[in-house]
Every structure is written in C-alpha cells, then in structure tokens.
C-alpha cells in the first residue's frame, strides 16, 4: 500500500479558538464550529483550527507552548493573481490581527511575495508567481522543472 500524493486536511493548533476563528473570518473565510473545532472548506481540502493541546494529544505528542516570534517549521502558502492582490491580502491580515513578517517584494527567485503570521504565529506566504498559474477555481498546478 502506498500513500496517495494528496493532503486532505490541514489542522492548526491554536491557543484561543475564538480569536483564531475571528482572524480567518476577517480575511473572508467562513467556517463551521463543531465540538470546539472550526472547519473551513479551502478549495479541495479542509482547513481546521483546534486547540493546540488537544491536537498534540490526538497526535500522541506532548503539548508544548507556542513560541511567538519563532518559526515552527512549516509555512502555508496562498498564491494570488496579481502583485496588488498580494499587497491587499497582507494589509488585510495585519488589520485582522496578524503580523506582516516580510513585506511583499520581488524575491530572489524573481516573483512577488511577502509573508505574515496569524495570531498563533503560523506562517503564511502570499505570492504572485506567474510560473505557478492559478485555475479559475484557485487550484495550482506545479510546473515541470526538468530539462
């Protein structure tokens, strides 16, 4: 048996469920709260907010406190269709209570990107990369990088 190459759900462990739900709703997302868990439909996958300690226990791990300002080893990405859309999303994230950690600019690879963290310090890249075109439904197809 081989694991299919797909992701079904992404769950973020949060310290304050109401605050985190309000943050993502301020960005225009709509979620459903069920049994102290918030579920968002995010394109073809589910995006979930759940208490940090509960998520750790569910994974069989010891919970450890969030370390604001320290990188947690994962970054989520949201590609957009223009540089202006990237700028607008970073500004919206800041207004909603996030922190812009990297203002948008043309990066070393040559596309426009910036980054923010949500109230729990989860990192998000916001990018306009014409090399990763978005379909009408917002899905991305990774291009062939070979010769």
Image (cartoon, rainbow, N blue to C red):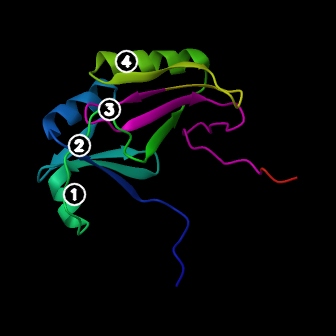
Between disc 1 and disc 2, the foreground one is 2
Give the number of the mark in front: 4 or 1.
Answer: 1
Q: Nearer the viewer, residue 7 or 40?
A: 7
Residue shown at 67% from the left, 48% from the top: 142
**Which residues fall within the magenta stretch?**
115-144
Indicate which label's residue lies in the foreground, 4 or 3: 3
How many neighbours does mark 4 have within 10 angstroms: few (below 14), some (14-19), or many (20 or more)?
A: some
Q: In terms of sequence position, does the residue under pointer 4 or pointer 3 come before the other?
A: 3
Horizontal relation, residue 33 to residue 128: left or right:
left
Image coordinates for residue 136, horizontal then vertical, percent: 59, 36
The verdict on residue 135 being magenta is yes
Mark 4 vs mark 2: give the one in front: 2
Answer whether labels 4 and 1 touch (C-beta < 8 Å): no
Query: Under tag 4, what secondary structure?
Result: helix
- Between disc 3 and disc 1, the foreground one is 3
Q: Residues within 10 Å of mark 1 (few under 14, many from 20)?
A: some
C-alpha separation, residue under disc 3 versus residue under disc 1: 21 Å
* Residue 137 among magenta residues: yes
Find disc 2 in the rendering and name its residue: 66
Direction from residue 125 to residue 59 in the image, left or right: left
Residue at 22% across, 59% down: 56
Residue lying at the far right of the rendered structure? 147
x and y percentages locating residue 7 in the rendered image: 46, 59
Q: Do the residues labelled 2 and 3 touch (CB within 8 Å)?
A: no
Q: Which of marks 4 and 2 is nearer the N terminus?
A: 2
Residue at 34%, 26% in the rendered image:
27
In contact (CB < 8 Å): disc 4 and disc 3: no
Relative image position of residue 47 (x, y in whole percent): 34, 48
Q: In this figure, which residue is indicated by the disc labeled 3?
A: 69
């Amino acid at each position: 048996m081989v694991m299919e190459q797909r992701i079904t759900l992404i769950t973020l462990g949060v310290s304050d469920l109401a605050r985190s739900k309000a943050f993502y709703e301020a960005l225009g997302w709509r979620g459903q709260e069920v049994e102290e868990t918030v579920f968002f439909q995010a394109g073809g996958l589910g995006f979930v907010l759940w208490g940090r300690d509960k998520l750790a226990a569910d994974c069989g791990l010891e919970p450890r406190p969030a370390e604001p300002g320290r990188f947690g080893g994962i970054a989520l990405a949201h590609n957009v269709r223009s540089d202006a859309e990237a700028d607008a999303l970073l500004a919206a994230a800041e207004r909603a209570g996030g922190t812009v950690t990297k203002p948008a600019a043309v990066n070393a690879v040559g596309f426009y990107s910036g980054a923010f963290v949500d109230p729990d310090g989860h990192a998000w890249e916001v990018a306009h990369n014409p090399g990763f075109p978005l379909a009408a439904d917002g899905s991305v197809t990774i291009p062939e990088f070979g010769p």
